[in-house]
Amino acid sequence: MKTQFNDYANDKRLALHAYTLAEQFIRSCEANNSNNPTSDKMDEVRIELYDSCKDGFDYFLVGDVLSQQNNRRDSFIEYVERRAKNELDRNQRAYDWLMVNAVYENATMHILDCFYNCYVIDDREADCWNGFIQWIKSKANGDGTFTFLQHTNNPITVR
């Protein structure tokens, strides 16, 4: 299929939609991670997004967001965009790519935070711009856990 480039910088509605889908997917993954502390708030999460590629959910757009880093971008373009035979195959390939490259990764959360601060709220002073090491230190709790999505009403804590 033809490579698709989304113009998040000039389409804030698309950026917010893409971010929202990525956040839903990440929450689904973390809700299924038995390594994480349990949370009553996980009842609100669409946990089925992790289990298998669900019709009607745009895994391609999520993958596009979570591949916004050079070392991930090339593999996403090659495996998902170039090899896909049609839209359905592209979505399945995006789901498969996410399972291998984005699930349970602190680096994924860093990319998502940078995407949010760049395209959704345009905050050039956010801590994510200080590099991964500084950013992850700012998310660390004293007990070996990290808290992500702190700007939401439902931040998540992961181990």
Image (tube, rainbow, N blue to C red):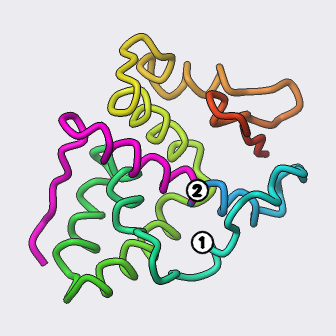
- Counting from the top left corner in percent of width and height, residue 120 is at 38, 32
Look at the image and give the residue range highlighted in magenta: 1-24
Q: Amino acid at mark 2?
A: Gln
Q: Which mark is residue 24?
A: 2
In this view, 20 is above or below 118: below
Residue that label 1 marks: 49
- Counting from the top left corner in percent of width and height, residue 71 is at 31, 49
Task: Name the outermost residue toward the left.
Answer: 2
Does 40 sit left or right of 109 as displayed? right
Does 159 sit left or right of 114 as displayed? right
Q: Quadrant of residue 73?
A: bottom left
Image quarter in which the C terminus is found:
top right
In this view, 19 is above or below 53: above
Does 86 sit left or right of 125 as displayed? left
In this view, 73 is above or below 2: above
Q: Amino acid at mark 1?
A: Leu
- Counting from the top left corner in percent of width and height, residue 155 is at 72, 37
Q: Badge 2, how many Cα within 10 Å: few under 14, some, many 20+?
A: some
Mark 1 element type: helix
Residue at image location 38% in from the left, 72% down from the top = 94
Mark 2 element type: helix
Secondary structure, magenta segment, majority class: helix
Task: Name the outermost residue toward the front.
Answer: 13
Q: Which mark is residue 112?
A: none
Q: Quadrant of residue 131?
A: top left
Residue at image location 66% in from the left, 55% down from the top = 27
Image quarter in which the N terminus is found:
bottom left
Question: Is 146 in the magenta?
Answer: no
Residue at image location 37% in from the left, 50% down from the top = 65
Spatial CA distance of label 1 from label 2 is 8 Å
Circles 1 and 2, Cβ within 8 Å, touching? The answer is yes
